[in-house]
Amino acid sequence: MHIRMDWRSVTFDWTRVRAFLVTAEEGSLSAAARALGMSQPTLGRQVEALEAELGVALFERTGRGLRLSPIGHELLEHARAMGDGARALSLAAWGQTEALEGEVAISASDAYAAYLLPPILERLHRAEPRIRIDIVVSNDLSDLSRREADIAVRNVRPTAPDLIARKVRDASARLYAAPEYLDRVGRRGTAAEFSDAEFIEIDDQGSLMHLLNDSGFALTGANFPYRCRNFTVMWEMVRRGMGIGVIDDRIGDNDPHVVRALPGFGPIGFPVWLAAHRDIARSRRLRLVFDALVEGLGP
């Protein structure tokens, strides 16, 4: 016997399903509440309401938090499919608009957001004042499929199949210092002469030290009295004469407060990519902003 279900009788509340999905993916109510921008009690009530609506327990409450129940595991994939469908609907509707107005979110690292994007966005605003730009400052790869941003400036090639990407240039980073710092420690002509110089590390893994040592320096942890994971803060420390730092030469060479610390040292190359969702790229507004970024960040 064939049973036909009338979809009009299905009354799922997507807000509750989303609460379950994000809680399952984040692993706790507190983390899910932060991700959704709501209070933990409100989120908990939504999850409990969905459990009551479905008549099943989606999570097992343990002393250490929440754990998906067997039925929760089974329903999670269906919830993800609903989430993908909701995002696809939103993306399709967003991409169909032809109006050159509205908001565009651009994700970029702190250094690019602070030093390279402003003149590009200023020119764009003069040309199209009805477009509003939301700058998402992040050194992580934003999930464009989930609309954390519409366009992302990245230093690695995006591989997700639902994204389009364009390499806008091969960039170069160099070592910079304030002139007064170099005057204080003495100007050096080779990498080996920097054994007692002070540098500002950029992450917890000692990436700058390892990179420089692979290029002829002989540095140890003693050469790095400061570590800063924010490039704009690191750059301000360099400008104040606190040590030597590395940054994109478009930023460093245009800053009158610094000079190249070792002019003969070869550049550190890295790519600059722009990425956007394939569906979003059909929007005139998004294409205009995307093209403005290509022109502004390109060679």
Image (cartoon, rainbow, N blue to C red):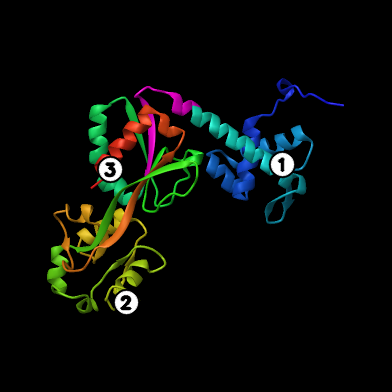
Three-letter amino acid code of the residue under disc 3? Leu
Which label's residue is closer to the chain start, 2 or 3?
A: 3
The answer for how far apart the CA atoms under marks 2 and 1 are is: 53 Å
On the image, the x and y values in percent for residue 210 come to: 35, 72
Which label's residue is closer to the chain start, 2 or 1?
A: 1
Label for residue 212? Answer: none
Of labels 2 and 3, the one closer to you: 3
On the image, the x and y values in percent for residue 51 come to: 74, 37
On the image, the x and y values in percent for residue 174 come to: 23, 62
Three-letter amino acid code of the residue under disc 1? Leu
On the image, the x and y values in percent for residue 30 come to: 59, 47
Callout 3 crowding tier (Cα within 10 Å): few <14, some 14–19, many ≥20? some
Q: Are marks 1 and 3 in contact (CB under 8 Å)?
A: no
- Quickly name the residue at label 3: 117
Q: Nearer the viewer, residue 4 or 210?
A: 4
Three-letter amino acid code of the residue under disc 2? Ala
The image quadrant that residue 13 belongs to is top right
Q: Give the residues in magenta.
A: 93-107
Callout 2 crowding tier (Cα within 10 Å): few <14, some 14–19, many ≥20? few
Q: Nearer the viewer, residue 147 or 178?
A: 147
- Under circle 2, the secondary element is helix
Of labels 2 and 1, the one closer to you: 1
- Under circle 1, the secondary element is helix
Label for residue 75? Answer: 1
235 lies left or right of 84? left
The answer for how far apart the CA atoms under marks 1 and 3 are is: 43 Å
Q: Are marks 2 and 3 in contact (CB under 8 Å)?
A: no
- Under circle 3, the secondary element is helix
The answer for how far apart the CA atoms under marks 2 and 3 are is: 35 Å
- Quickly name the residue at label 2: 222
